[in-house]
Image (tube, helix red, strand yellow):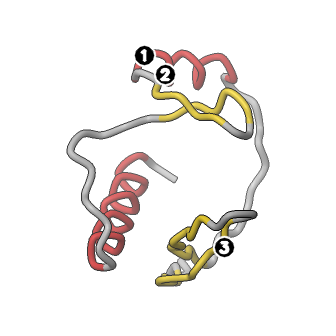
Amino acid sequence: MESGALAALAARLETVAAEHGFEREKAPMEWASDDRSRARRVNKDETRDALNAVGERNFGVSKIESITLYRSHLGPNAASYEALATSLFQSR
């Protein structure tokens, strides 16, 4: 996906999230996972360097037909998830 299409998707997701009561981000954020239980904020240079490091690596192709926005509900023993909205992608 080209960066313009990705930016449009991100903007649409933020709009849908706002329609469901989520606050819009004040500044763009990028995250990197240190492990499965913790994420940390990263800067754009670090993200660019990580992408350059994988160079021409082929990650394969995945067909994504829809995306679903979930709200998590934290409980005493586990979290549960509520589907708020699903958007279907158009075929080309």
Callout 2, which amino acid? Arg
Which SS class for mark 1? helix
Q: 71 and 47: which one is in front?
A: 71
Q: CA distance from mark 2 to mark 1?
A: 5 Å
Which badge, 3 or 1, comes first in the chain's sequence?
1
Q: Quadrant of residue 11?
A: bottom left
Question: SS of the residue at dot 2?
Answer: helix
| Number of residue marks | 3
Pointer 1 residue: 45
Q: Are marks 2 and 3 in contact (CB under 8 Å)?
A: no
Q: Nearer the viewer, mark 3 or mark 1?
A: 3
Looking at the picture, does residue 45 appear above or below residue 11? above
| Residue 48, position as x, y percentages in the image | 49, 21
Nearest the viewer among 20 and 1 is 20
Residue 16: image location, x then y, percent: 34, 75
Tag 3 residue = 80
Q: Which mark is residue 8?
A: none
Mark 2 or 3: in front is 3
Residue at figure coordinates x 35%, y 51% from the top left: 4
CB-based contact (under 8 Å), mark 2 and mark 1: yes
Residue shown at 62% from the left, 75% from the top: 81
Which residue is pictured at 32% across the width and 67% down the height?
22
Compared across the picture, whether 30 is left or right of 55 comes to left
Residue 46, percent from left and from top: 49, 17
Q: Which residue is mark 2?
A: 48
